[in-house]
Image (cartoon, grey):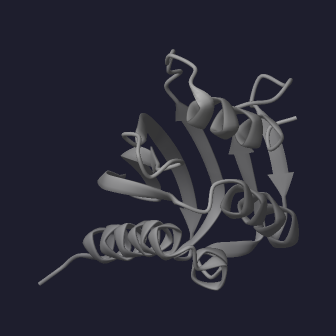
Amino acid sequence: MKTTEDTRETTNRSVVQAQFDGFVRHDLDAIMATFAQDCSYDQFSGNAAHGKRFEGRADIRRAFEKIFIATPRCTFRNPVLVVDGDTVVAKWTFVLDGHAKKSPLEIEGIDLFELEDGKIVRKSNWMKTRIIPINHASAYIARRLAGLFR
């Protein structure tokens, strides 16, 4: 028989996995269904110590819409989830395929999720910085991504 703690952790793992599944499909409705009404998302870049903060579901949705518009062929691969009560840490690989004739750009990162009652109330992420040779395709991708994080 599962304990209350086991059930909560199983639920929290499922919620975070559902968010990753939504990102793979670029399904904003599925992604947003994982967030509580009162929520925040701290993006890895920005001028503040916590990065750029988006508050509330509408603000977070707009941030994710911009990512999908700027990088329509992006996905997340191989999320590894570690659950401790209402905290979930996810290690993932972001894959950006910006040019059919070039190898995809892969960047590893981590998300830290805080959940309450089976919904995400705070999401923070960190991403490794990649130094890559600039060619036509990667310059295009860099320009598209730069516009997102101002």
Locate residue 144, reporting x and y percent.
74, 43
Q: Residue 120: horizontal and vertical position, in percent?
A: 60, 66
Q: Position of residue 133 (x, y in %)?
A: 50, 16
- The x and y percentages for residue 26 are 57, 73
- Residue extending furthest toward the left: 1
Vertically, is 47 above or below 26?
A: above
Q: Is residue 149 left or right of residue 112?
A: right
Residue at 61% in and 31% down: 136
Instruction: Give me the residue at 80% from left, 44% from top.
Output: 148
Q: Residue at x 57, y 20 (%)?
A: 134
**Which corner quadrant holds the N terminus?**
bottom left
Comparing 19 with 130, the one in front is: 130
- Confirm whether residue 84 shows in the render: no
Looking at the image, residue 42 sits to the left or right of residue 123; the answer is right
Image quarter (top left, top right, bottom left or bottom right) of the C terminus: top right
**Does 54 sit above or below residue 34?**
above
- Among the 4 quarters of the image, the one containing residue 122: bottom right
Report whether residue 10 is seen. Answer: yes
Question: In front: 36, or 143?
Answer: 143
- Name the residue: 50% across, 21% down: 130
Number of callouts in the render?
Answer: 0
Up-down relation of residue 89 to residue 21 (above or below): above
Q: Nearer the viewer, residue 10 or 71?
A: 71
- In the image, 75 versus 31, the foreground residue is 75
Q: Is residue 61 left or right of residue 27?
A: right
